[in-house]
Image (tube, helix red, strand yellow):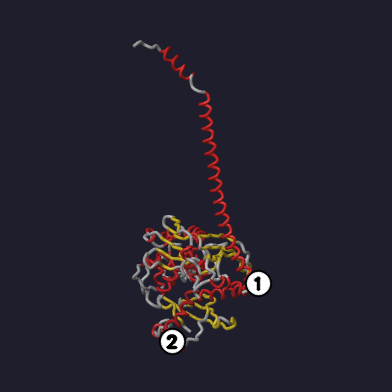
Amino acid sequence: MGIQLDWQIESERAKQRATEDPNAKRYRRRQRRNLLLGMAVLACLLGGILGGIIWRLRAVDNQVRQNLLDTVDVEITAIKVGNLSNYMQVKRSASEDWLQNQRDLFNEYQELKQAGLLELTGKVVSITIDEPRGRVVLEEKIAGVPYRVVWFYWLYEDNVNGQAGWRRVPPDVEFWGDEKTIDKGSLKVTYHELDRRMAEALANQVDGWWDEACTLLICSAGQAQLTIEIAPETLPGPEWDLYEEWKVRLPSPLLVGRARNDVPFTPETEAMLAQLLAEKLVTYSRGNNFRPNDYSDAEWMQREVMAWLAGEFTSNPADGSRFFTTFTAAFGASAPGQILNNLRPDSTFSDLQAVTGSVALQDLGLERLNSFYWNDYFQWRLELEKTTLEDQDQPACYQLYDETPNATAAANARCVSYDPNQITPVVNGTVITSDPDGNLFAYVDALSNPNDTSQREQIIFRWVGSTWKRMN
């Protein structure tokens, strides 16, 4: 066998290539083009079919959506023209109570409309469909204030009594949206999508309350995370959870009525939540087993510390304690916390010495004493007389009075029997004075009848020992 050189091998390859049929090459190329063209045509056909299906689905969805909006419009129009029959025609429920509630709501709308307070804007804030369920959030204005309401619907296929299609149904708490959480460290807010705006506003407002309470009262409370759950449940207001110590449950405002659109976390709800938290923290600070004596100054002071802390949370003096607001102006923001820590079941105003530099209250001077807001305390003392008699505790009623002859005569007139029709005077002002012997007196200006400002009386209290006693 001979040896082939490189140039001989390349020559033979070239001969082989040269012998390939040109027609075969053209045929092969044509087949490749046809295959690619077929694939392109098939892709176009499939794309067209898929596009048609998507278009059809969207058209059906749009029609379902439009039908729901048309149903909503029927209700709004019925309210505007005052047609109860048309309004109830789109309602469907096995609950007669809910249907009656809708009739009552219709009448409420008519009263608001006649008073010129109702503006049905017809603005749809959001619409959510998860067949056969539908949910529509609408805006309406009452006395110029924007509100949101949520209406729930069900798409019925059966034509019972001509009631096929979208029909308004009772609130569906399972269709409140996905559950979400806002975590701010010491505060966690859980909610469903429908209550998102309220949850965000609440979290921004309440964030910091826990740390503030730690500064003003105790730091141990700040170690626990506060959880606030906004739940689509019928609750009277904010309340503590039965199973988790530091969890508050709030009702969704959309469940039973309207929710403010301009102020998602209303001042009213904020005040109730602040009071609830303040009561819990003050009780926790003193120990859950601590109980002030009934009818004692300690009872009033603990209650006022709670109110003061709530006012500190909301930065609204109307939510707080006017007495401790004036008291802290003189002795600092830590004063209520110090008073609370030194509070005993039988404490009186003498225990305020813990924050007055060991100066007895009666020795602070008339100017300082008159800088405190006493009206609420003396109002409580006047109402306490009625409370003791309701509790059938006559000795406690007598303890509210001085032992002078005039005071004893007054006590005999008021503490002997309980009169449910007795009107408690309303305190209008207080002035602290003293006599030449240094005895302190509180002259309380009061309205004998709150409905008649001309009926006024002056009630006098005297400082006896460590508290105030009524003299007349």
- Neighbour tally class for label 1: few under 14, some 14-19, many 20 plus, Cα within 10 Å: few
Camera sees residue 322: yes
Q: Is residue 42 left or right of 384 when viewed as pictured?
A: right
The one of 169 and 338 positioned closer to us in this rendering: 169
Asked if residue 82 lies left or right of residue 12, the reply is: right
Badge 2: how crowded within 10 Å, few (<14), some, or many (20+)? many
The quarter of the picture where the N terminus appears is: top left
Q: Which residue is mark 2?
A: 415
Query: Where's residue 102, x and y in %?
Result: 55, 73
* Amino acid beneath label 1: Val
Instruction: Check if mark 2's residue and mark 1's residue have beta carbons within 8 Å.
Output: no
Picture quadrant where residue 8 is located: top left
Q: Nearer the viewer, residue 306 or 160?
A: 160
Q: Is residue 399 left or right of residue 119?
A: left
On the question of residue 145 being in view, the answer is no
Alpha carbons under labels 2 and 1: distance apart: 60 Å
SS category of the residue bearing label 2: loop
Front residue (pair 148, 168): 168
Q: Position of residue 402 (x, y in %)?
A: 43, 82
Of badges 2 and 1, nearer the viewer stands 1
Q: Residue at x 43, y 89 (%)?
A: 416
Q: Position of residue 298 (x, y in %)?
A: 40, 73
From this viewpoint, which residue is outermost toward the top?
Answer: 2
Q: Which residue is mark 1?
A: 81
Q: Position of residue 274 (x, y in %)?
A: 46, 65
Disc marking residue 138: none
Q: Nearer the viewer, residue 307 or 101?
A: 101
- Amino acid type of the residue that numbered disc 2 sits on in the rendered structure: Cys
Callout 1 secondary element: helix
Q: Is residue 244 above or below residue 102?
A: above
Mark 2 or mark 1: whose residue is earlier in sequence: 1
